[in-house]
Amino acid sequence: MSWPDRAPLVADSSWEGYTDVPLDIMRGYTTLFAEIGTAPTHVFVQAGVGGLAGAAASYVRDRWGEETRIVVVEPEAAPCLMVSAMEGRPSRVGGGRTTLGRLDCREPSLLAWRLLARLADAFVTITDEQAEDAARSLAGQGVRLSPCGAAGAAGLLSMDADTRAALALDARSRVLLVGTERSH
């Protein structure tokens, strides 16, 4: 008996011929945003294959329009979405090693890429150390996330002055950080 005969595949990554289940999972991810009252000016969301980021972008544009900036944050060692954005097509990357295991993805989800190619405002990368620093900083505020879960915050904290200006990110901004994976 082969793998498909024993159990169905349930993944948030998609490819040609496998889109129904990932689409349902991405729809489920949007519940993370349903209780947010005031629209943020910026959303920083971590990405591996892009399922969560694609869901976030879709929800943001549907509910809050074009004014909210969507920033996709990936590990420096696995920037499949950033490279895809630069190449204008879904692209597989080699990359190095990262401790950000859930984000260590070399190829974007087809569905997520189709959304993010149209809806994301920026793609940024972070180092493992930046993610660890962000997790420590958040823990100091009572928010316990793994470095992987704090990647969105790391993306915000890594912004230089020019990038902040380009994204209209300033003291008046209302930033939504998507935190996943609680630390132990």
Image: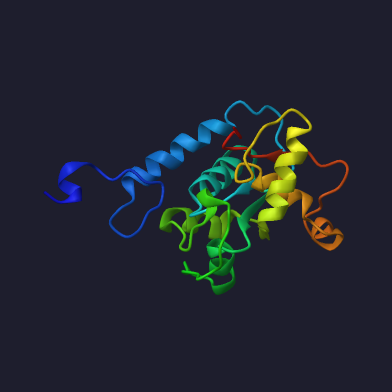
- The answer to whether 87 is drawn above or below residue 183 in the figure is below
Residue at 52%, 51% (x, y): give it: 101
Residue at 61%, 58% (x, y): give it: 75
Q: Quadrant of the C terminus?
A: top right
Task: Inspect this view and state whether residue 68 appears.
Answer: no
Residue farthest toward the left in the current orientation of the protein: 1
Counting from the top left corner in percent of width and height, residue 114 is at: 47, 58
Residue farthest toward the bottom in the current orientation of the protein: 87
Task: Inspect this view and state whether residue 77 appears.
Answer: yes
- The answer to whether 66 is drawn above or below residue 83 in the figure is above
Residue 34 falls in image quadrant: top right
Residue at 54%, 56% (x, y): give it: 116
| Number of numbered discs visible in the structure rendering | 0
In the image, 49: left or right of 18?
right
Residue at 81%, 50% (x, y): give it: 169
142 or 40: nearer the viewer:
142
17 or 48: nearer the viewer:
48
In the image, 118: left or right of 171?
left
Counting from the top left corner in percent of width and height, residue 119 is at: 58, 54
- The answer to whether 40 is drawn above or below residue 49 in the figure is above
Counting from the top left corner in percent of width and height, residue 147 is at: 64, 45
Residue 118 falls in image quadrant: bottom right
| Figure coloring | rainbow
Counting from the top left corner in percent of width and height, residue 76 is at: 63, 62
